[in-house]
Image: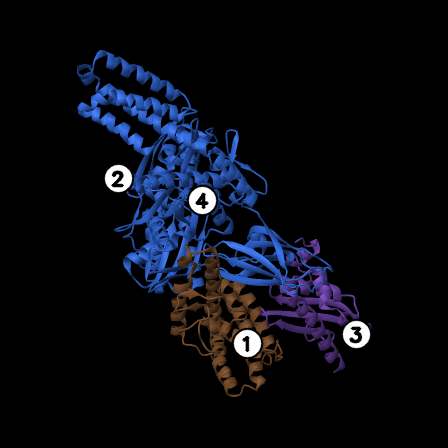
Chain colours: A purple, B blue, C brown
Amino acid sequence: MAYSEKVIDHYNDPRNVGSLDKSNDNVGTGLVGAPECGDVMKLQIQVNPETKEIVDAKFKTFGCGSAIASSSLATEWVKGKSINEAMSIKNTEIVEELSLPPVKIHCSVLAEDAIKAAITDYRNRSQD
Amino acid sequence: MERIIGIDLGTTNSLCATVFEDGPEVIEAAGASSTTPSVMSWTDSGWLVGQEARESGITNPENTIFSIKRLMGRDLNELGDYVNQLPYQIVEAQRQLIKVRIGENEYTPQELSAEILKKVKMQAEAVLGETIQKAVITVPAYFDDAQRQATRDAARFAGLEVARIINEPTAAAIAYGLDEKKEGHVAVYDLGGGTFDISILKLSGKIFKVVATHGNTQLGGDDFDKAVADALKERIQKINPDATFDDPESKLLLKQNAESIKTELSFSPESSYSLEFPKTGLTFDGVFKVDEFESLISQMIEQTLESCSHVLREAKLAVEQIDEVVLVGGSTVIPIVRKKIESFFGKPPHVAIDPYKVVAIGAGIQGHLLAGGRRDFLLLDVIPLALGIETLGGTFSKIITGNTTIPAEESETFTTNVDNQTSIDVNIFQGERELIKDCRALGQFKLRGIPPMKSGYPLVEVLFCVDANGILTVSATEKRSGQKAEIEVIPFHGLTQFEIERIIEDSYEHALDDFNQRQLIEFRQTAERVFRGIEQSWDVAENSLSGNERTEIRKQMESVRQSMQGQDAQALKVQLDLLGDLTRPLADNAIGRKILAELQENESVI
Amino acid sequence: MTSPLFCFSCNSLQTIADNINYFEVLGFPLCFEIDHDELGNRYQRLSLEMHPDFFATAPEKEKRLSEKSSALLNAAFSTLRKPTSRARYLLSILTGDKRLKSDTLPEGFLQEMFTLQESLDELLESGDETALSGINENLQGRHTDIESDYAVLFKKFETSPENSEILQQLQTQLNSERYLRRLLDRINTE
């Protein structure tokens, strides 16, 4: 089984690890978990309120390598996208990009859920 | 009932045992040592194995092989600096396999290990007076799949069918448990020549269940020897900064002296040595103190105790819950080792059983059980390390976890990534770490013959089966079509089926040769003994035999001598027999009888 | 005792039926509460009959069957002896075709787990043994509480088998257990 350099890279050197200020109204936070393995993943986005573009994204994942790689990839992908575009990212795209094996597909689902949860949180907060 | 003997195939020594009418015991000829040093030496007349090889080693260091067990199922990378200490030459063969080069020939560790097994088998056959075909062979509990496979292959090369591979500490526990008839949790601390194991067993009624096991297949008395040898080198270099020790003679000389220093320090506060390097003619004398030895090895003992802590955690037991600590392996006779074990477990270890023999005896008992001789106990063992496959980004996905009771089966379902894909490659690993780079690659298998379907649609169920020997086999079925997928496992550190068959074929071809060689050696030795006997009784012969008869004997002795120079064992035998006939009249006196006895014994061996 | 894997009266291994469940293997009814001593005894008795060691000289086919049966017995025993794996296994059987939400958790639980993981980061970094053993004890206690809830819930389900809400509650407990287990493993291995 040969893995692309990219995959190994996301595992060994995850991007955008960290936190954004939760109290900032332009920040949306998604917290999700995978009951299959007890992984927890927090993904945060910072949105430009004018353009609705995601200007920054951070994550923190307590979980296996695949979960970390999936969330790392997710933060890379959402940056620069509008929140509507980001909303349409599918877990299957992550599976494909990282060539995740069947036993690890739930990790990609987790990343997709985290993106959605973060956007929903942002929308709820910015409407208030 | 067919006999199944037990063989403890050790790093330093090997021995075998069986169940006799009055109980289990090691198999030994009267008055002879039961242990065979795991050493072999290639000489002009073929392999010398055991004590002879050990003794002749120093004059033939490049062709003298010891500690072959540490090379079983390993590659050059894994062995690292270890191979540089060895006086014999290691070369890399295809697929990261290693071989030992002796002259023009290269041998796999399996083939060399087979020589030890052949010797042990022959000795046992001589004592028992029957042929032996089956054996239980012990391996360190922490041996992984590749190392177990290698051991099994070695046995095949030696013409032995492996009835079961069992773990050394477990074998010891059988012998201990049946002997002491105790119940509860037993920790078996097994520190041998090259490997360390700690196993915790629960003994209850007829069942001996391994709860957890841990260890290190590259830590043992050999490493203590190395530490002493390094210290010796340092001392010598202090006096003579230019001294080098890279030639095979020096390496073996240092190793053997270090070993005897270590042995002496087990019962004496100091050991004096006198080294004489044959190449340079340099000599060094000195004294090694037990304190120095203890500080050299204390770090390594600590390492074993860390394994003990680990195994207790795995077993979910507090140290107080261990009812007995049983010591196994030659290195546990070292006082500092015992002291540290005692302070770790908070109780003196059980030392009533012979740590050198207990593993072989346990294996012998297990062999008796397998042969159908008894069924009043059962050993339930575990796999030491998780088995699984490589998944994303070099991560290790466990399929069967470590310390699972064997036999065990688990399956995992795979699918395809691409439409109409008909094969999948899977890499198999063994270990406890999260990344495959920290685990051992066992092999790669290709799933072929998947019916063409849309991607993600096929459901290929891959079944991992670990048998009672702790050896893995893999099979696969496509669930939607019910089609059995073909699996071809390519071992990374072992021999392929093809290679095994070729070696066995070769050995059949050489079997006649080998047999001839062995007989030749036997007959030459007999002839020497007979000559000595004749010379000793020549005075008698002068009185009791006619001049003609004496001349005949002298002439026949010359013929025997000529045959001894040749390579034909049978021809030598014929000449020896003729000499026997001629010297028969000498049987009238004691020495003559001795000669005759010598010749008759020789006949019975043939 | 009886087991579909071995006939005690004719002393022989039986063919393994498809879809046999672990409770059947050891001759227990499909019920969470299990007599632990009896479980151990039955495991030993069956092992003493079926283990490959006793078939070393048998024909190849029987040898293989003994390997298979023993592997199944080992899996059954290791699943049933621990409450969480037994609960998970039983729940999957009882659920059958019914649909349960797989990711339910008590309110605020996930946030709490995340916070605990973060504080573990710090504690493991600083090596504060007292604080660590405090957390360990606390989590261990919660873990035990969850495990003792299984029996109550399964009992409830026995009396009202049409109420799949109880199964959902069990699912929630089992989900929570995974997160707690994860934390406990981290404390005890790092």
Tell me, yes or no, whether the two marked residues, 2 and 1, touch with CB atoms within 8 Å: no
**Separation of marks 3 and 4 at Cα, in angstroms:** 74 Å
Tell me, yes or no, whether the two marked residues, 4 and 2, touch with CB atoms within 8 Å: no
Q: Quadrant of residue A21?
A: bottom right
Specify whether disc 3 shares its chain with disc 2.
no
Label 4 resides on the chain identified as B
Picture layout, residue B113 above or below residue B246: below
- Identify residue type, mark 3: Pro
To which residue does mark 2 refer? B30
Residue B297 position, x and y percent, is 40, 46
Q: Which mark is residue A49?
A: 3
Looking at the rendered image, the disc whose residue lies closer to the viewer, 3 or 4, is 4
Q: Which mark is residue C93?
A: 1
**Separation of marks 1 and 4 at Cα, in angstroms:** 46 Å
Picture layout, residue C66 above or below residue B547: below
Label 1 resides on the chain identified as C
Specify whether disc 4 shares its chain with disc 2.
yes
- Identify residue type, mark 1: Ile
**Separation of marks 3 and 1 at Cα, in angstroms:** 50 Å
**Separation of marks 4 and 2 at Cα, in angstroms:** 26 Å
Q: Which mark is residue B155?
A: 4
Specify whether disc 1 shares its chain with disc 4.
no
- Identify residue type, mark 2: Ala
